[in-house]
Image: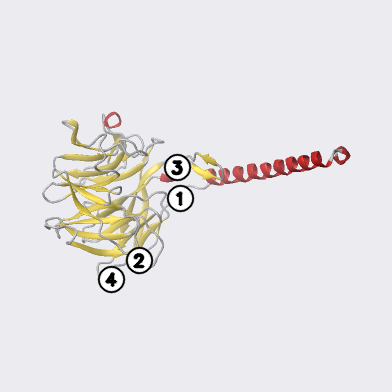
Amino acid sequence: MIRRLQALPPTQRQWAFLGLLAAVVAIFLALAVLVLILIARSSPRLIPVALQANVRVAEFARLSDPQAYPAALAIDPQGQAIFTGSYVHGAVWRIDPQTGEADELLGSRTNVGSVTALAVQPDGLYVLDRIDPLEARGFIVWRWTAQEGWQRRIDYEGRDEVLLPDDLAFDGQGRAYISDRGRDAVWRFPDEAMWWRSPQVEGAQAYAPTGLAYLPDRDAMLIGDSLLDILYQVDVEADDPTLATVVLYDRRASGGQPLGLDGLTVDGQGRVVVAALATNQILALNPVDGTLTAWAGNYRGSSDVAYDVQRGRFIVTNWDQRSLLPLPVLFFQVPIDPHLPFSLDTLIVEE
């Protein structure tokens, strides 16, 4: 073969060399893509670990549905049930707080499109429905009770006033608050008005108000910015909420890595606890010096955390959100299967 190539005219020999070089490069690229795909698909299922001596973590409830993607959760204050739902297809599950057994709520999958947030009120379970997990199509807030089923309470389907709804919380008067990462704002209902805008931050090019939690002892709303990693406290009765905004935590003061502050909760001692999706950790705010302490980590997707008042424990989502979108590998988009099963985990702080 070499003699045949040497016998070719110079121009043909150059083209033959280039063709051979291209074939070798293509083989190496294919092997590299194959190795990266194998690494991505064979990586082990992460197991949460405690990061403090007085913290215990454990798996609590497994969801058998391979498309469960439990991004949000809520707990009945009376301790009768824990609720979570699928970010992908809208099913909502009621979980027994003792056994961890999950039962799908009748009609949830046919009514709800994408469970983005959940909240339990005296008159029922409220579900923030993004309609489509990957596209902006407006939103719906559903109310569910065992007696009345599913009812639309706020209907913005097909409307773009609220661009990227993320979290849902209620204040002491039963008013609903929805964070909007697309508009850098928090909306309040039934006012149907933009209640709060992200304060200007020096050097910031964008904002992302995400997690919400009501602080009843302060009659204030806690707002977390997942892009800037700032925690705000806002008086819900202020005439101008922006002027009544207090910064509880600002990552720029510590210069640490991005945390992706997401779901928020408050425990029985008034401690603010937050799920950090970028680092897959659960963090607690020190009210004295404004620092965050990592209680647990190594989650597959810690986007929300809720406090179980009756049992003195935290429930954490663990939902492997990386597989929602294909993994870009060189010039290819490789679908990645989630590490199943999806689960909710417990976190207990021993005092």
Residue 8 found in image quarter:
top right
Left or right: where 232 falls relative to 298: left
Q: Is residue 113 above or below residue 194?
A: above
Q: Which residue is mark 2?
A: 252
Q: Which residue is mark 3?
A: 323
Left or right: where 191 falls relative to 71: left
Residue 264 found in image quarter:
bottom left
Which of the marked residues, 3 or 1, is nearer the chain's N terminus? 1
Q: Which mark is residue 332?
A: none
Left or right: where 131 falls relative to 332: left
The residues tagged by marks 2 and 3 sit, at their Cα atoms, a distance apart of: 30 Å
Q: Amino acid at mark 3?
A: Ser
Q: Position of residue 267 (x, y in %)?
A: 23, 57
Q: Position of residue 250 (x, y in %)?
A: 31, 64
Q: Amino acid at mark 1?
A: Leu
Q: Nearer the viewer, mark 4 or mark 2?
A: 2
Q: Nearer the viewer, mark 1 or mark 4?
A: 4
Disc 4 element: loop
The residues tagged by marks 4 and 2 sit, at their Cα atoms, a distance apart of: 14 Å
Q: Which residue is mark 1?
A: 46
Quick one: 38 or 194, which is closer to the camera?
A: 194
The reply to whether residue 340 is visible in this rendering is no
Which of the marked residues, 2 or 3, is nearer the chain's N terminus? 2
Q: Is residue 323 above or below residue 108?
A: below
Q: Nearer the viewer, mark 3 or mark 1?
A: 3
Which of the marked residues, 1 or 4, is nearer the chain's N terminus? 1
Disc 3 element: helix
The residues tagged by marks 1 and 4 sit, at their Cα atoms, a distance apart of: 32 Å
| Quadrant housing the N terminus | top right
Q: Which mark is residue 289?
A: 4
